[in-house]
């Protein structure tokens, strides 16, 4: 993979900490490669991650070179890459609002038309499964199917996009929407968009995305 892509993955990881969406060694970032993926190492922090510290690996878990170990959540990334060819990069965070909603074991419903940006009428929440396990990988891949984001019960969130920078933007957008939904719910009953309204938003997003090229 190119040095520029490796640098972008590392920079996105550092940006997640800078934006307050991860703390310590929480969360991870990866990008698809011709031979699998490259992912941030286990125990990574904003101070230690750089392009050289990323771990290249196959989607079956085989590490291609070096002594560094991949993130404990590598299987979740690999499962999403294997299931969806649109996924070029993945961001997983423990961002506050996303994690708070996930700890209610709830998805993000159609309270705002911007939900359509993730490919459907809602953002699903995968059931709780122990972190870093094949069962979590399978649960996340199922919850995100047909979408580009999902919540992970009692854990956090995960998003994918064509590029690492795009995945960062998607993660920020999802965190913003979760925060807005929780604020609205605290203030009173939230009016959800109807199926027809969300269908119209999804059509508009398809046209908008096509127009941007």
Image (cartoon, rainbow, N blue to C red):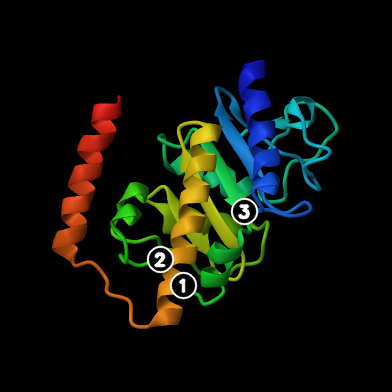
Can residue 84 be seen in the rendering of this structure? yes
Q: Can you say which quadrant of the picture contains the C terminus? A: top left
Q: In this view, does 65 lie above or below 171?
A: above
Kindly state the secondary structure of the residue where label 3 is placed. strand
Q: Residue at x 28, y 59 (%)?
A: 121
Q: Which of 18 and 152 is in front in this view?
A: 18
Q: Which of 14 and 6 is in front in this view?
A: 14
Q: Is residue 144 above or below residue 86?
A: below
Which residue in the protein does label 3 denote? 93
Mark 3 Cα-neighbour bin, 10 Å: few <14, some 14–19, many ≥20 = many
From the viewer's perspective, is the residue at label 1 or at label 3 nearer?
1
Which residue in the protein does label 1 denote? 183
Q: Does the residue at mark 1 contact the one at mark 2 (Cβ under 8 Å)?
A: no
Q: Say which mark, if any, is on residue 108.
A: 2
Q: Residue at x 20, y 36 (%)?
A: 207
Q: Which of marks 1 and 2 is nearer the N terminus?
A: 2
Q: Which residue is drawn at 70% across and 35% down?
A: 62
């Amino acid at each position: 993979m190119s040095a520029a892509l490796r640098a972008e993955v590392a920079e996105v990881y550092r940006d997640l900490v800078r934006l307050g969406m991860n703390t310590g060694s929480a969360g991870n970032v990866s990008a698809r490669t011709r031979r699998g993926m490259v992912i941030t190492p286990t125990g990574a922090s904003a101070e230690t991650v750089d392009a050289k510290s990323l771990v290249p690996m196959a989607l079956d878990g085989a590490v291609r070179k070096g002594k560094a170990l991949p993130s404990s959540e590598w299987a979740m990334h690999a499962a999403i890459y294997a299931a969806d060819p649109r996924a070029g990069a993945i961001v997983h965070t423990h961002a506050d609002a996303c994690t708070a909603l996930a700890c209610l074991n709830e998805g993000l419903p159609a309270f705002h038309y911007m939900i359509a940006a993730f490919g459907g009428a809602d953002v699903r929440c995968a059931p709780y499964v122990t972190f870093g396990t094949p069962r979590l990988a399978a649960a996340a891949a199922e919850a995100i199917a047909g979408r580009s984001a999902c919540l992970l019960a009692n854990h956090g969130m995960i998003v994918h996009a064509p590029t690492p920078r795009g995945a960062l933007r998607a993660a920020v957008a999802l965190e913003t929407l979760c925060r807005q939904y929780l604020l609205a719910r605290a203030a009173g009953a939230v009016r959800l968009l109807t199926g027809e309204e969300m269908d119209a938003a999804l059509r508009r997003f398809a046209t908008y995305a096509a127009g941007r090229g």
